[in-house]
């Protein structure tokens, strides 16, 4: 009898030991916990931030809470430049912003080069895009794991604009970056750099006659309160980039890495859906407040900025890669 009891006990111990090994993954991921500080310029409620919340929800659920994500909206942890430096140093793990970390990606925002946010994704997921991401990883210690969509950049103005000639001599606030400045010079306007915090009063007092930004930025900043028109120029698409510290990413078990990548895609799709919903709501509200939306001659704007695309695109990528990017930026994604 004693031998029988002992045999049962030994069998149970053996089974328990086997069960313990099976419960842990080969790379030990199920027993490890990780914390991610994820910073952004976006404010709570904005489509991009809603995409980040979806990312957090998926990651925490699919890792059974072993990966916890703390979101920091509204540049709480510093400017975009400061946040990028923190990600590089590893003092925070992730950020999303309009700064991709390298010119080769940044200049995909050249006027009328990308036909939509989806075209950005297509380029970044291509062999060329992967080369750029590898370069980011090797040279700066960060990688892009996805994007968060923003609306196309449009112009707000106190004059009706239907063609480039209507912008002749117009003082328009634009960022002090060459492709912004050269774009509006090509359209005949007078691009005027101005700190974003001064734009509302600048428009109100006539220091500048117009400005350009995604619709959600125009709405949240209240520029429509001091402007009569929104011109649907859609002259640039530029999403936010989801950036993660490479050393931290490699410290994650492979199954957690896959979860982060998949969650980034779902977060992007969620943000795109909310962006479309919000755009319709914002437009309706702005029209009720007296703003007129204008659909200009897009082809005329595209032709007027051809030299900007050609000059800067060739300078950044070389002619061969530039031609490939042009083709990908306008391809049929249906």
Image (cartoon, grey):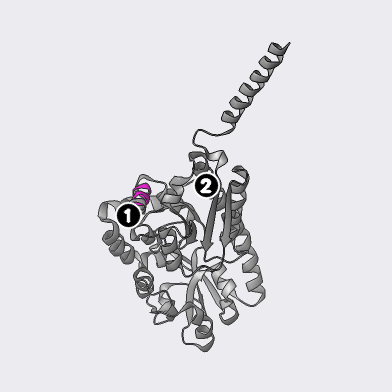
Residue at 71%, 13% in the rendered image: 2
| Camera-nearest residue between 42 and 129 | 42
Helix or strand or loop: what does disc 2 sit on? Answer: helix
* Figure check: 193 above or below 73: below
| Camera-nearest residue between 137 and 262 | 137
* Figure check: 138 above or below 7: below
Query: What is the span of residues highlighted in magenta in the rendered image?
Result: 129-134
Residue at 53%, 40% in the rendered image: 29
Q: Earlier in the sequence, mark 1 or mark 2?
A: 1
Q: What type of secondary structure mainly makes up the magenta span?
A: helix
Q: Position of residue 124 (x, y in %)?
A: 41, 50
Task: Please state if 33 lies on the left or on the right of 3 as rendered.
Answer: left
Q: Pointer 2: what residue?
A: 260
| Camera-nearest residue between 212 and 163 | 212
> Are the residues at dot 1 and dot 2 in contact (C-beta closer than 8 Å)?
no
Residue at 54%, 70% in the rendered image: 217
The quarter in which the N terminus is drawn is top right
| Camera-nearest residue between 224 and 200 | 200
Q: Position of residue 247 (x, y in %)?
A: 41, 50
Q: CA distance from mark 1 to mark 2?
A: 22 Å
Q: Pointer 1: what residue?
A: 139
């Amino acid at each position: 009898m004693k031998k029988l009891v002992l045999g049962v006990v030994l069998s149970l111990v053996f089974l328990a030991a086997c069960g313990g090994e099976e419960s842990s993954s080969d790379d030990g991921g199920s027993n490890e916990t990780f914390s991610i500080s994820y910073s952004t310029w976006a404010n709570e409620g904005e489509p991009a931030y809603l995409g980040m919340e979806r990312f957090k929800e998926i990651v925490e659920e699919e890792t059974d809470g072993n990966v916890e994500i703390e979101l920091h909206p509204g540049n709480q942890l510093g400017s975009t430049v400061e946040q990028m430096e923190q990600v590089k140093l590893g003092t925070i793990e992730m950020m999303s912003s309009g700064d991709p970390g390298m010119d080769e990606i940044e200049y995909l925002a050249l006027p009328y080069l990308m036909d939509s946010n989806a075209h950005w994704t297509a380029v970044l997921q291509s062999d060329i895009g992967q080369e750029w991401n590898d370069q980011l990883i090797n040279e700066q210690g960060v990688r892009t794991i996805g994007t968060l969509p923003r609306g196309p950049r449009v112009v707000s103005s106190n004059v009706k604009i239907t063609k480039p000639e209507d912008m002749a001599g117009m003082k328009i606030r634009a960022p002090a970056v060459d492709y912004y400045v050269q774009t509006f010079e090509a359209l005949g306007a007078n691009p005027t750099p101005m700190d974003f915090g001064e734009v509302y009063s600048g428009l109100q007092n006539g220091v500048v006659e117009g400005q350009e930004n995604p619709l959600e930025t125009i709405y949240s900043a209240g520029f429509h309160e001091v402007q009569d028109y929104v011109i649907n120029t859609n002259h640039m698409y530029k999403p936010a980039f989801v950036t993660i510290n490479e050393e931290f990413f490699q410290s994650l078990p492979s199954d957690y890495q896959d979860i982060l990548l998949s969650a980034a895609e779902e977060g992007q799709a969620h943000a795109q859906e909310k962006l479309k919903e919000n755009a319709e709501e914002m437009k309706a509200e702005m029209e009720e407040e007296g703003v007129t939306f204008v659909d200009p001659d897009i082809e005329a704007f595209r032709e007027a900025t051809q030299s900007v695309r050609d000059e800067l695109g060739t300078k950044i990528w070389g002619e061969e890669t530039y031609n490939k990017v042009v083709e990908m930026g306008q391809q049929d994604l249906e």
